[in-house]
Amino acid sequence: MSLRTGTAVATTISAIFNPNNLKIEGFYVQDSFDSKKKLILLCQDIREIIPQGIVINDHEVLGESDELVRLKEVLEIGFELVGMPVQTESKSKLGKVNDYATDTSSMFVQKIYVSQSIMKSFSGGALSIDRSQIVEISSSKIIVKDLQQPLRAKLGSSISSALAS
């Protein structure tokens, strides 16, 4: 929404992620005035994020990709966070990213949410992984620190071994 006109000037299509630091650099938007135009809104041009949408000064802050020289490398990578496979350092597959949480003041991704396979989801459900647990991000997967076993499993094995002796 434009502060100047008070109307919608574009519709957000997807976020532009920098895979080097998991920061949202901007958003691809569909121009409301020319439906064939796909423009870019940089995060620095966002005035406020409200429940109704993103507030910007005016349509003029939206730019075309060839105008954004500093963002060229990130745009060429074309990194998509949602759908990215996630595995642990010990190569255990956890699932795929299905959502993420962002700090709206810094635009850094703080958590990723991983949906597991049907069999794993019965036993453990969805996983929430903090950015501090991420070890590496490549073009094909995200590697996170090995997950600790649930406390119940550890207690269960301790009780079993105590009963056996």
Image: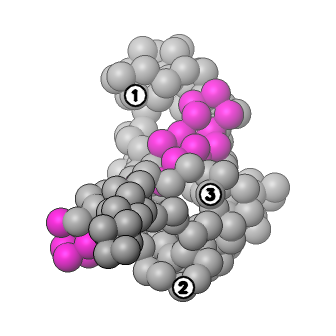
The answer to whether residue 25 is above or below residue 65 is above
User: Number of labelled discs?
Assistant: 3
What residue type is disc 3 on?
Gln
What is the x, y in percent for residue 165?
Answer: 37, 74
**Whether label 2 touches label 3, CB < 8 Å:** no
Find residue 89 and report its horizontal and vertical position in percent: 61, 78
Q: Nearer the viewer, residue 165 or 69?
A: 165
Question: Up-down: is 17 above or below 78?
Answer: above
Specify which label sits upstream in the sequence, 2 or 3. 2
Other residues around mark 3 within 10 Å, as few (<14) / some (14–19) / many (≥20): some
Q: Amino acid at mark 1?
A: Gly
Residue at the (67%, 59%) spot, across then down = 18
The CA distance from mark 2 to mark 3 is 15 Å
Please state which of residues 105 and 55 is positioned toward the viewer in this rendering. Answer: 105
20 in magenta: no
Q: Secondary structure at mark 3?
A: helix
Disc on res. 91: 2
Q: CA distance from mark 1 to mark 3?
A: 30 Å
Quadrant containing the N terminus in the rendered view: top left
Which span is picked out in magenta? 101-122
